[in-house]
Image (cartoon, rainbow, N blue to C red):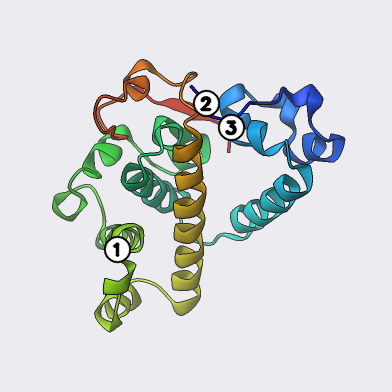
Amino acid sequence: MTRLSKLPAEQWDADLRDLTRAEEATPLEQGLLRIMAHAPELAKALVAFGGTLWRSHTLPRRLLELVRLRIAFHNQCRSCMAIRYQSAVDDGLTEGMVCSLEKPHEAPDLSAAEKVAIAYADLSANDHFSIGDETFAELRQHYTEAEIVELGMFIAYFIGYGRLGAAWDMTEELPQGFQDKSANAAPWGQESVRVRG
């Protein structure tokens, strides 16, 4: 059960509703904003930051979704693991690739560039002090410095927002496999929900 109350869109600040097209969104697409709507100025600032990230990205949408889902697993953010963004599916993301996230370094359907980005995400989520020159040397084999900056900013966004989502525990609208908290969940091997974006 969600630990903080979710406000229906009609109770949101009008600017926040307009900024997010809340009336057009499903409850899962409204996501944590239903809770953040209690602090509308902060919610609008986060939406503006996230919107800038997504509008300005140059990395493939499929790659960003793979990284997001791998971080969601480390964060144990069940709402993060349950969703798949339609733009990533349109960019070639398959559930087979999502299943590859269980052991990404062994996955034949992930590119070398995707594996390096996922490894960077793993270190960032679990042991950021172990990130060193070797990590960046591997990243530079596949990405420009601007792309590494972009990747790092998305990783930071996914880690922070996902941990907040895990703490707020918004799971009651998710497929059943993500509601069972007797064990850790994973984005692979579970029913998922496609959302706009």
Residue extending farthest top: 176
Query: x, y percentage for residue 97?
Result: 28, 41
How many callouts does the rendering have? Answer: 3
Q: Residue at x 45, y 66 (%)?
A: 152
Residue 105 position by quadrant: bottom left
Left/right placement of residue 155 relative to residue 50 reads: left
Q: Quadrant of the C terminus?
A: top right
Few, some or many C-alpha atoms within 10 Å of disc 2 (few <14, some 14-19, many ≥20)?
Answer: some
What residue did someone put label 3 on? 31
Q: Secondary structure at mark 3?
A: loop
What residue did someone put label 1 on? 123
Tell which circle, 3 or 2, labels the residue nearer the N-terminal end.
Answer: 2
What residue did someone put label 2 on? 2
Q: Which dot marks residue 174?
A: none
Tell which circle, 2 or 1, labels the residue nearer the N-terminal end.
Answer: 2
Amino acid at the residue labelled 1: Leu
